[in-house]
Amino acid sequence: MSFAMLLTMLLCFTLTVSVAVSIGLSSILGIQMANANMLISVKEMFNSINKFPLAAIPFFILAGNLMETGGISRRLVEFAKSIVGGVQGGLPMTCVLTCMIFAAVSGSSVATTFAVGAILIPALIKHGYPKPWATALQATSAELGVIIPPSIPMILFGVSAEVSIGELFVAGVGPGLLIGGALMLFVWLYSKYKGWGKNDGDGRLSFGNATWQAGWALLMPVIVLGGIYGGVFTPTEAAAVAVFYSFIVGTVIYREIGIKDIYNILRKSVISSSVIMFIIANAGLFAFLLTRAGAPEAIGTWLQQVLQSPAYFLLGINIALFIIGMFIETGAAILVLAPILVPVAVHFGIDPVHLGMVMVVNLALGMVTPPFGVNLFAACTVAKISLDRVIKDLIPFIGVILGCLMLISYVPSISLTLRDLVFNK
């Protein structure tokens, strides 16, 4: 049954059927093969989304859309530019830094791509950077949206693997800073090598002025993350706080959100949230059927026999996840694979939180790799450029992320040191 389900799902992917429908169809086939009651599908799909932490997902998506429309993202760009925009290559460094700050409240890489890319891709092109390179930079930098907490994929991993979401959020700070710093160093050196960005400081605000203008925007990540780590509210409650704060700032303080904008903001948020929730529901049913068929135990035993050390296990799952991430949506991959891989990781003495960081970072790469990289498509949409023109410039950025991924995989302290300090492990 498990083999038939997996084969059906892969066949649907090959025929370009949507991810959620592919998983759902393969699950229905599994129910029919098991001669089970079809009511199981409704029950398990409901159980998959009937979890309090998942309420954070639509709230974070709504907060990201409010930030984009309410002028918060534009002020964050000016603030980041005031810090690093004065050097040669400062504008692409601004792109990376802005994505890091925006990621601290949005939780979504696609929202980061649209909110930041709509401002910085035209600016990069205006300052002489090639459009394909600027597009590749934005798509890669926005990946930080799911690595730096809060993060929707981390919430999904925590729910599916029964791991503390708070611990995952704290653990994501180290990998996020590592990748952000590596990307900033790379674009600075590359810009100097190419002779780009000698006038990046033109029109740059002073640090004090930019900080004053972006003060309310900068206070948002402090409130959201400070509230989570300070134990004031849960990650789910933090998402609701982010919505309330961004709405008040956008409507009352910056006054850039009007009555007519609210419908479009809500519509975009509902559509994005519905897509993710539909995937979660179908993936939950799929995972339930695989578990009932004994697939996780069989795969776990096979992995333990083939990959006989933690080093080989991490290498094996990194290769597998990199390939899987190219074809399967990040959330669906986490929901299906996390319950299978976590017990094997524990057998090898790998902390589940560390495994979560490896999975999230690796699958986030799938957001910028063809053929189904959602960040890549979003950035190409903003830049109005075809995908094939971006691939060549994308390769060096992927190389930088892969290098960081190897460090995150084999140096657990990058992820776990801060977690251990905060939670007294």
Image (spheres, helix red, strand yellow):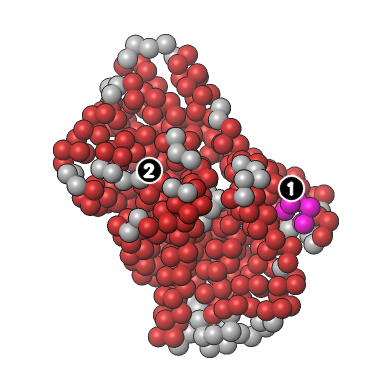
Q: Which residues are magenta?
A: 244-250
From the viewer's side, name the closer residue of 322 and 239. Answer: 239
Determine which quarter of the picture holds residue 289.
Answer: top left
Q: Percent from the top left, x then y, of residue 119?
A: 63, 68
Q: Which is the main secondary structure of the residues drawn in magenta?
A: helix
Judging from the image, what secondary structure is the residue with disc 2 in?
A: helix
Residue 158 shows in the view: yes
> Residue 128: x and y, percent?
53, 82
First-in-chain label (1 vs 2): 1
Name the kind of residue labelled 2 in the image.
Answer: Pro
Question: Which three-letter amino acid code belongs to the residue tagged 1?
Answer: Phe
**Image location (x, y in percent) of residue 362:** 37, 53
Element at badge 1?
A: helix
Q: Residue at x 54, y 38 (%)?
A: 275
Location of residue 321 with respect to 148 vertically, above or below: above
Is 248 one of the magenta-colored residues? yes
Residue 66, placed above or below residue 219: above
155 or 372, nearer to the observer: 155
**Residue at 58%, 50% in the rendered image:** 229
Q: Can you say whether 328 is above or below 209 in the image?
A: above
* Residue holding disc 2: 352
